Image: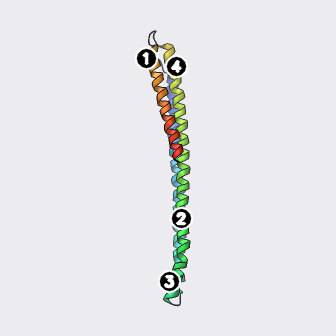
Amino acid sequence: MNINLEQFAAANRATVDSLLAVANTALASAERIAELNLSTARSAVEDSAASAKAVIGARDAQEAMAIQIQLAQPAIERAVAYSRSVYEITAQTQAELSQLLQEQFSDFQNSTSRLLEQAIKTAPVGSEDAFMSIQKAFASAYTAFGNMNAATRKTK
């Protein structure tokens, strides 16, 4: 079986493109998390300053305690909102990476099938059984990946 230089170069380009897609997805996710963290930190500083001013402006200890209790609920709501945002970013990134993996596996499956068919056509007489075994092994691997992928989707 001969693999020409063009096929080899195309396979390398596809690999580089796949790696770049994964890297870009990861970097976009990191950027969204960083923006969320900066926004949250900015809000926390502003809220802390406003809270401190409100507590300092209290006329007595009882009023200061009431102000602190009143400020606790919005802080909890902001923390929950932050957690929800991190979860959404993470889930979106996971979905994007999962889609990329599925596409890459599909491309791999197609290219290995084509290469195997090419090899069968140019194989010496009598090697059919060996190639059938290889085809069955690939089919089993593809089925296993499909089952694993389906199980992963069910757990989401």
**Which residue in the structure is indicated by mark 4?**
117
Mark 2 or mark 1: whose residue is earlier in sequence? 2
Mark 2 or mark 3: whose residue is earlier in sequence? 3
Residues under numbered marks 3 and 1 in contact, where contact means CB atoms less than 8 Å apart: no
| Disc 3: CA contacts within 10 A as few (<14), some (14-19) or many (>=20) | few
Q: Give the mark toward the camera: 4 or 3.
A: 3
Q: State whether residue 33 appears in this view.
A: yes
As helix, strand or loop, the secondary structure at mark 3 comes to helix
Q: In the image, what residue occupies the spot 54% across and 51% down?
A: 91
**Which residue in the structure is indicated by mark 3?**
65
Q: CA distance from mark 2 to mark 1?
A: 59 Å
Q: CA distance from mark 4 to mark 3?
A: 77 Å
Residue kind at label 2, given as amino acid type:
Val
| The quarter of the displayed image where residue 78 is located | bottom right
Q: In the image, what residue occupies the spot 55% across and 73% down?
A: 73
Coordinates of residue 43 in the picture (x, y in percent): 55, 69
Residue kind at label 1, given as amino acid type:
Ala
Mark 2 or mark 4: whose residue is earlier in sequence? 2
Q: Is residue 18 above or below residue 71?
A: above
Q: Is residue 69 above or below residue 89?
A: below
Residue kind at label 4, given as amino acid type:
Glu
Q: Give the mark toward the camera: 2 or 4.
A: 2
**Which residue in the structure is indicated by mark 2?**
80
Coordinates of residue 57 in the picture (x, y in percent): 54, 86
| Disc 2: CA contacts within 10 A as few (<14), some (14-19) or many (>=20) | few
Q: Give the mark toward the camera: 4 or 1.
A: 1
Mark 4 or mark 1: whose residue is earlier in sequence? 4
Please give the label number shown on residue 130: 1
Coordinates of residue 54 in the picture (x, y in percent): 54, 82
